[in-house]
Image: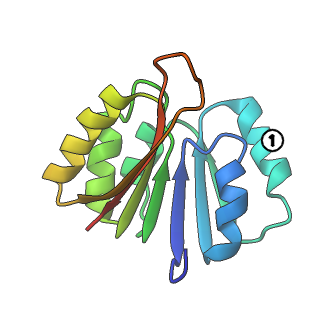
Amino acid sequence: PPGTHTLIDAYCGVGLFSAFLAPRCERLIGIEAAPAACEDFAANLDDLGNVELYMDAAERVLPGLQARPQVVLVDPPRAGLERAVLEALTRMNPERIIYVSCDPATLARDAARLLQGGYYIESITPFDMFPQTYHIESVTLFSR
């Protein structure tokens, strides 16, 4: 996004979002726990000089990270965000949080915590990527 100096992509996987976003910011920090995904992330984004990768769980990396991102993208597993991640996000105070969710229930729980932390929901876009099932993906934009 224009004007973004630092962007964090937590639960970045193989870097699909990062590959799109890195050219649009000065510094991109990826966080991923799965070793195979980290290897693919490194291979996929090797030619970009503004990308860093932390190979560990987001709940262990984010609380100690000293970055001051303008934007944080999270794409957590079905269980949603750990409390340590939510507390770190609130402390970091990014202007925007983009939350990619595969479970409306955990999104609702985490959204309530972000709203209590001073954010508001700017938009929610649902995606029915698995027709004839109860699975719904969504992208929610939280702003300050």
Q: Quadrant of residue 120?
A: bottom left
**Residue at image mark 1:** 40
Residue at left 55%, top 53%? 9
The C terminus lies in quadrant: bottom left
Work out whether 110 lies above or below 15: above
Looking at the picture, how far across and down is residue 19, in whole percent? 73, 59
Work out whether 34 lies above or below 6: above
Residue 127 appears anywhere in the view = yes
Most distant residue in the top direction = 133
Residue at left 34%, top 70%? 95
Does residue 141 appear left or right of residue 7 in this picture?
left
Residue 67 appears anywhere in the view = no
Residue at left 27%, top 35%? 108
Looking at the picture, how far across and down is residue 121, in whole percent? 27, 56
Looking at the picture, how far across and down is residue 112, in whole percent? 19, 42
Q: Secondary structure at mark 1?
A: helix
* Camera-side residue of 95 and 130: 130
* Camera-side residue of 33 and 9: 9
The N terminus lies in quadrant: bottom right
Looking at the picture, how far across and down is residue 70, in whole percent? 42, 71
Q: Quadrant of residue 55?
A: top right
* Camera-side residue of 25 and 2: 2
> Disc 1 residue type?
Asp
